[in-house]
Amino acid sequence: MNRRLLLVGCLALVAVAAGAMDSDGQPELKLVPAPKEVQMRDGGFRVGPRTKIFVQFGHQSEDRIAAETLAEEVADQSGLRLDIVGMKAAGKAEGGAIVLARLQDRRVRRFLARNGLRADQLVGDQGYLLFSDKSHLVVAANSGEGLFYGVQTLRQLLRPHGKGLMCPAVEIRDWPSLEQTGMPDNMSRERAPEILPKRWREPGA
């Protein structure tokens, strides 16, 4: 009888442990709202004192709010103050940078496609793609609103790691679902603020 109770107890512990993992044995991500497609990878992207946030020129007035929101999250969690740097669409961000990009950039689309993230019609204006590995952390969207939503997901992924933060290596595609009423199901997402933040600088400034 005691052996049977012990076996039941062991099975219960295994079930609890399995509930914290996905089907590939990776830690389960608790993201709100839950993205449509998530694929965990090995490793992660480290955010440290030298990490910069790159935003493409031509979209600063829309996208810098997302960059500022991300910078404030990093500062709140780690005390690090990351520089936000403007980048030409044809330019190349330095290694180890966080890149907030638009999917109209063919190089960005090709890079994401090579890593299994398709910028198809499902993504739309409010959707986004998020990719991270040891060397890259990219959030890309067709609009400033989509980019803002992608940054909200990125904020949830960041975790304390040493003197900085860590984003797990992951591939995410997300977009709002339309109910029969035609209203998106992502109403729980924060709305992108209308007021633009202050801090912004160009390379070399």
Image (spheres, helix red, strand yellow):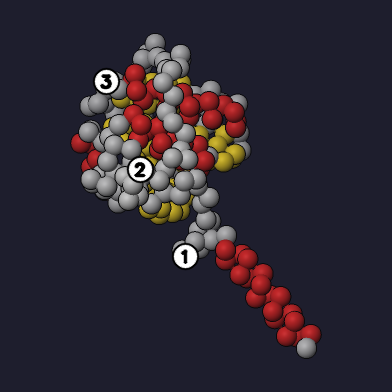
User: Which residue does the numbered mark 2 point to in the structure image?
Assistant: 183
Name the mark nearer the viewer: 2 or 3. 2
Alpha-carbon distance for marks 1 and 3? 41 Å
* Disc 2 and disc 3 in contact, CB within 8 angstroms: no
User: Which residue does the numbered mark 3 point to in the structure image?
Assistant: 58
Label 3: how many Cα within 10 Å (few below 14, some 14–19, many 20+): few
Alpha-carbon distance for marks 2 and 3? 30 Å
Q: Residue at x 50, y 42 (%)?
A: 157
> 94 or 129, which lies in front?
129
In which quadrant is the N terminus drawn? Answer: bottom right
| Residue 171 visible at all | no
Q: Quadrant of residue 140?
A: top left
Dot 3: what SS?
loop
Q: Residue at x 39, y 11 (%)?
A: 205
> 195 or 42, which lies in front?
195
Dot 2: what SS?
loop
Label 1: how many Cα within 10 Å (few below 14, some 14–19, many 20+): few
> 65 or 166, which lies in front?
65
At label 1, the amino acid type is Ser
